[in-house]
């Protein structure tokens, strides 16, 4: 069990108090646990509606009051801009958190309640058409447009999934990898550190990001068409102020998993993004996009290797990392970067400016 993760039994026993605090009508209710690694999430259904009760890990920075208030601000901003996000429920005192009196974990345990969004997720192994991937890129662009000029202190933080920290985090986990994979990971880390040095990163455009638009955090109305309608955006716990181009890069990395041509995935997501946003993109941003997309998968497999060491009998952990290694090997070449550069040049109304192309 993750240290500091709230206790399920105690959380369930406090549900009547939590529902009353957030002005949710009493009466019989049903609950079911939802997937979560660090926190504890419950789907609670009453006659009047369905809600998500989120009990946050008080030992993690992501569970602090400042971070949770920032998430609420982000959700409100996206909703005001017409994006499908949950409602944040509040108490009579207009408070969006509830502090549990019982010691569910060491440290402060804060609870929030959001409306439950209906929809389906599209699994990794579902083939993704160019049309779907361009729509995904456009969604990243739409999100960035909604957040343009938006900021708050709670988004200025860091943690192990911060894309500015990829080399040091992955290097700290190299000893969990086999020698062959360790060599690949080390080489990719070195390339990342060179392409996204602190000096280069500081010069890239920045914005608040959702920073985790993956296959489990996007809901669609169906999974039976090339471009199903978006039904919801979930999970704002990774939101952070960082390089603007990281938003589509993170999404492209995740949606390249289990796909026949990861290079095509990166190209079409970038195309959709650039067709949506009005700003120009510099060559250094194209380079950052590639390394961040690949780097997100590198982070994922590094964490999977560490967790497999901690749970050696868990075959699921080892199995789920295999698609990630396949993506890393497919993206281990400079031709992929050159193709992205060509996509950026092809998009109507977009002009690659700024830095000299260096082929990295």
Image (cartoon, helix red, strand yellow):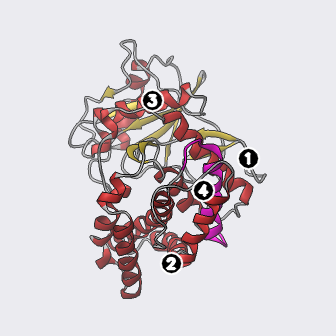
Helix, strand or loop at mark 3: strand
Residue that carries the numbered disc 2 in the rendered image: 332
Q: Earlier in the sequence, mark 4 or mark 1?
A: 1
Disc 3: which residue: 113
Residue at the image point whose x is 73% and y is 47% from the top: 228
Q: Residues within 10 Å of mark 3 (few under 14, many from 20)?
A: many
Q: Residue 113 at what x, y percent from top left?
A: 45, 29
Q: Magenta stretch?
A: 258-280
- Measure how far apart labels 3 and 2 are at the Cα level: 43 Å
Count the marks.
4
User: Residue visible at 33% across and 74% down?
Assistant: 309
Q: CA distance from mark 3 to mark 1?
A: 28 Å
Q: Disc 3 or 2, which lies upstream in sequence?
A: 3
Q: Neighbour class for label 2 at 10 Å: few (<14), some, many (≥20)?
A: some
The image shows residue 80 at horizontal and vertical percentages of 55, 25
Q: Earlier in the sequence, mark 3 or mark 1?
A: 3
Mark 2 against mark 1, which lies toward the viewer? 2
């Amino acid at each position: 069990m993750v240290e500091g993760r709230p206790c399920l039994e105690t959380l369930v026993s406090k549900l009547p108090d939590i529902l009353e605090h957030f002005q949710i009508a009493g009466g019989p209710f049903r609950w079911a646990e939802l997937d979560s690694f660090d926190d504890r999430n419950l789907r609670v259904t009453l006659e009047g509606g369905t809600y998500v009760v989120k009990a946050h890990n008080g030992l993690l920075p992501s569970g602090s009051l400042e971070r949770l208030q920032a998430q609420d601000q982000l959700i409100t901003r996206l909703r005001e801009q017409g994006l499908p996000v949950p409602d944040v429920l509040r108490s009579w005192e207009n408070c969006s958190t509830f502090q549990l009196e019982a010691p569910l974990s060491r440290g402060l345990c804060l609870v929030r309640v959001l409306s439950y969004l209906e929809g389906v997720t599209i699994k990794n192994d579902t083939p993704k058409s160019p049309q779907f991937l361009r729509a995904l890129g456009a969604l990243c662009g739409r999100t960035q447009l909604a957040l343009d000029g938006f900021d708050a202190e709670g988004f200025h933080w860091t943690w192990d999934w911060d894309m500015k920290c990829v080399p040091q985090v992955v290097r700290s986990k190299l000893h969990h990898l086999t020698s062959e994979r360790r060599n690949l990971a080390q080489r990719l880390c070195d390339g990342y550190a060179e392409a996204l040095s602190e000096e280069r990163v500081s010069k890239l455009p920045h914005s608040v990001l959702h920073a985790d638009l993956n296959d489990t955090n996007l809901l669609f109305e169906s999974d039976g068409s090339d471009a199903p309608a978006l039904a919801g955006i979930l999970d704002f716990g990774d939101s952070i102020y960082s390089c603007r181009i990281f938003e589509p890069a993170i999404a492209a990395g995740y949606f390249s998993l289990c796909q026949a041509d990861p290079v095509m995935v990166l190209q079409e997501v970038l195309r959709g993004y650039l067709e949506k946003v009005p700003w120009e993109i510099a060559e250094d941003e194209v380079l950052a996009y590639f390394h961040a997309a690949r780097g997100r998968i590198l982070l994922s497999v590094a964490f999977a290797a560490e967790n497999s060491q901690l749970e050696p009998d868990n075959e699921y952990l080892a199995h789920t990392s295999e698609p990630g290694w396949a993506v890393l090997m497919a993206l281990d070449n400079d031709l992929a970067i050159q193709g992205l550069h060509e996509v950026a040049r092809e998009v109507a109304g977009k002009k690659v400016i700024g830095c000299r192309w260096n082929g990295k």
